[in-house]
């Protein structure tokens, strides 16, 4: 990428957003972060406030993005609650940020002649009937279940992004992010990595839902950020998977955490949440061919980096 760029990131105080801010500032770019802290953390913004190339706007992008200043080169839309406890607590806000928020970000990009990147998700595949999941798979999504506020928000966000590309000529990118973990995840994130790490570190039994045979593929955040940076350097408008294809059952994953932290801990079982996907694994062929990208950090290496970095901020009441 040509230096320096001016990059606006919505959701900049979130887990992934904050790592993007760090990467781009480290490369010498100018970054404007936007967040309303519905699930982002002020401590993530505070990491960068003293940096001369960083500015922050506290705003809800569903109601507009009050950016004033020089032209933007990129608008990267990463704002949204992203874990089931968060988006089920804020279902309307989640739908709005996927709909109005995405359109506001697209309009900002269009007004500045900027490129646009949408953070979509593997959740658009729902409870997949095709395994692994290629980008050509249309998914198996419950459109009105408890997870639908997130799944359908992202599916709509992809649709409006492609519509703006086709009708207004915006240079767009769409990434479908698979389960990602690393430092700066919230302790109350509610996803399996933070649940297990926090339970293990506090000496509690590890809670597995169902019989633990459901699978996930866990990607370390540095690999995701590298894939995003590479996608910025190519022209490609269709969705692209970014995830680690190493697949683990949830029970096996719980055993890995337990054995690393405290082998004496018990594993207990609870009822399976509604519409919880039974399997999840990316087909990364497109990313490998277009970007020369494949994840490098193993699950165990990523866990070593993450242990001790779990944060304890709770959701606002």
Image (cartoon, rainbow, N blue to C red):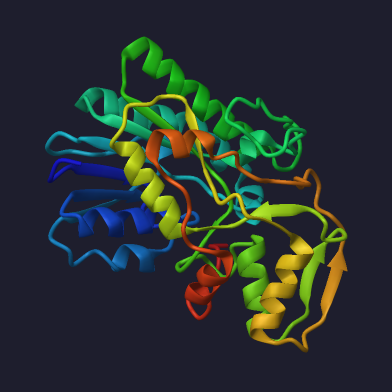
**Residue lying at 28% horizontally and 30% vertically, measured from the top left:** 115
Check the image and report above or below for 263 versus 63: below
The image quadrant where one finds the C terminus is bottom right
Q: Is residue 167 left or right of residue 50?
A: right
Q: Is residue 279 left or right of residue 290?
A: right
**Residue lying at 61% horizontally and 48% vertically, measured from the top left:** 87
Residue 147 point in image, percent of width and height: 70, 42
| Among the 4 quarters of the image, the one containing residue 229 | top left
Residue 231 point in image, percent of width and height: 36, 38
Check the image and report above or below for 161 versus 225: above
**Residue lying at 75% horizontally and 45% vertically, measured from the top left:** 277
Residue 178 point in image, percent of width and height: 57, 47
Q: Is residue 270 left or right of residue 216?
A: right
Work out whether residue 156 or residue 95 is closer to the camera in this orientation and state it. Answer: 156
Q: Is residue 193 left or right of residue 212?
A: left
Task: Report if residue 202 is visible in the image.
Answer: no
The image quadrant where one finds the N terminus is top left
Residue 97 point in image, percent of width and height: 49, 38
Work out whether residue 218 or residue 291 is closer to the camera in this orientation and state it. Answer: 291
Check the image and report above or below for 307 versus 144: below
Task: Report if residue 49 is visible in the image.
Answer: yes
Count of numbered badges drawn on the protein: 0
């Amino acid at each position: 990428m040509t230096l320096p760029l001016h990059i606006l990131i919505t959701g900049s105080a979130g887990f992934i957003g904050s790592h993007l801010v760090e990467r781009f500032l480290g490369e010498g770019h100018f970054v404007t972060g936007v967040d309303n802290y519905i699930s982002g953390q002020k401590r993530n913004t505070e990491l960068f406030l003293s940096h001369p190339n960083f500015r922050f706007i506290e705003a809800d992008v569903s109601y507009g993005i009050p950016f004033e200043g020089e032209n933007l080169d990129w608008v990267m839309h990463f704002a949204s609650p992203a874990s089931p406890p968060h988006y089920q607590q804020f279902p309307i806000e989640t739908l709005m940020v996927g709909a109005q928020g995405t359109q506001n970000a697209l309009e900002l990009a269009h007004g500045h002649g900027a490129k646009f990147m949408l953070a979509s998700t593997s959740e658009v595949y729902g409870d997949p009937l095709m395994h692994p999941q290629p980008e050509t798979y249309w998914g198996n999504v419950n459109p009105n279940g408890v997870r639908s506020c997130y799944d359908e928000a992202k599916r709509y966000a992809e649709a409006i992004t492609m519509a703006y590309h086709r009708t207004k000529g915006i240079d767009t990118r769409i990434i479908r992010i698979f389960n990602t973990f690393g430092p700066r995840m919230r302790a109350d994130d509610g996803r399996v990595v933070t649940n297990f790490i926090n339970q293990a570190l506090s000496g509690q039994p590890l809670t597995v839902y169902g019989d633990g045979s459901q699978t996930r593929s866990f990607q370390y955040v540095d690999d995701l950020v590298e894939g995003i940076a590479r996608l910025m350097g190519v022209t490609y408008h269709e969705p692209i998977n970014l995830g680690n294809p190493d697949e683990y059952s949830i029970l096996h994953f719980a055993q890995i955490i337990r054995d690393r932290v405290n082998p004496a801990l018990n594993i207990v079982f609870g009822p399976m949440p509604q519409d919880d996907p039974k399997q999840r694994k990316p087909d990364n062929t497109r990313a490998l061919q277009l970007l020369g990208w494949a994840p490098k950090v193993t699950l165990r290496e990523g866990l070593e980096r993450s242990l001790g970095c779990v944060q304890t901020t709770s959701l606002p009441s």
